Amino acid sequence: MVWRRRGRVLAVLVAVALLCGVGGVNSFAAPSGLKGGEASGPKGAEASGPDGGEAGGPHGGEERGKGRFVVSERQFERMFPERDSFFTYEGLVEATRAYPEFARTGSRTVRRQEAAAFLANVSHETGGLFYVVAQDESTYPVFCDKTQPFGCPAGESAYYGRGAIMLSWNFNYKAAGDALGIDLLNDPWLVERDPKVAWMTALWYWNTQTGMGTLTGHEAMVLKKGFGETIRSLNGPECDGGRPEQVKHRVGLYRDFVRVLHATPGRHLSC
């Protein structure tokens, strides 16, 4: 299978997981990962956090929209040592302004857990932010759903996976563009040209879409339903024994990333 990375072609054997009719998320292992062991703290125990306890939920006892982004640039670099330069830290921070409650809701621990969960799933989808554009080119036409009334004005092969969460399908480009005030239906290539848009589309999915689950990624973490529920939202077919190795890889990344952020992972890590 061929994966394109910023203008050059890399031959990589990968397992593609298509989120049929929902997310268009495509999964493969990172070419190299964060060095280090699993997160510190008792496995399966709820993190208490340095602020002395968990928030009471998304609508009570929490801090909203306060403070700087919980992931520093140094921590970001540590999480993604072989990332493509297209995926900038600045682009990520700018993109979070479109969703001010992302990683800014709940206790300090919950905020760090949500950031780690989002970035772990991003890492899984993009090979550690190594790939800007995924998909075997022969599959590009698959992601044009001709039953949609708006069709595929950019062309049948224009809606393949791009960006930090490998957004695909014409209906997802339409919905994300409408939510963000950008015409992605007619110009889906913007997701691979503009780092901020690449991050914004990922945050759009994380904060607004449930996929095969019942919660968005944001809701799953803020409501303390666990990292496993974010997997169900992003790529449900992996859950319930569907693709255990993919789930294991996501969980391993999440454990590594919460460790980088000096938090513990909480309960319900798998799906």
Image (cartoon, grey):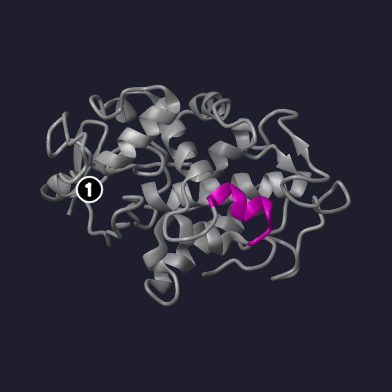
Q: Which residues are magenta?
A: 216-225
Describe residue 235's horizontal placement relative to residue 150 as left or right.
right
Residue 196 can be seen, yes or no = no
Q: Can you name the residue that lies furthest to the front here? A: 149
Give the amino acid at mark 1. Answer: Gln
Residue wearing tag 1: 135
Q: Is residue 140 above or below residue 181?
A: below
Give the camera-side residue of 142 and 269.
142
Q: Is residue 221 magenta?
A: yes
Residue at x 54% of width, y 47% of height:
118
Residue 224 can be seen, yes or no = yes
Describe residue 229's horizontal placement relative to residue 168 as left or right.
right
Quarter-of-image position of residue 68: top right
- Image quarter of the N terminus: bottom left
Q: Is residue 31 above or below residue 67?
A: below
Quarter-of-image position of residue 27: bottom left
Picture coordinates of residue 25 (x, y %)? 35, 51
Quarter-of-image position of residue 15: bottom left
Q: Is residue 88 magenta?
A: no
Q: Is residue 115 above or below residue 22?
A: above
Residue at x 63% of width, y 53% of height:
221
Q: Secondary structure at mark 1?
A: loop
- Please identify the dominant SS of the magenta region: helix
Crowding at label 1, few (<14), some or many (≥20) Cα neighbours within 10 Å?
A: many
Picture coordinates of residue 18 (x, y %)? 29, 57
Q: Can you name the residue that lies furthest to the right here? A: 52
Residue at x 42% of width, y 73% of height:
244
Residue at x 52% of width, y 30% of height:
92
Picture coordinates of residue 2 (x, y %)? 17, 49
Describe residue 164's horizontal placement relative to residue 19 as left or right.
right
Give the camera-side residue of 74 and 183.
183
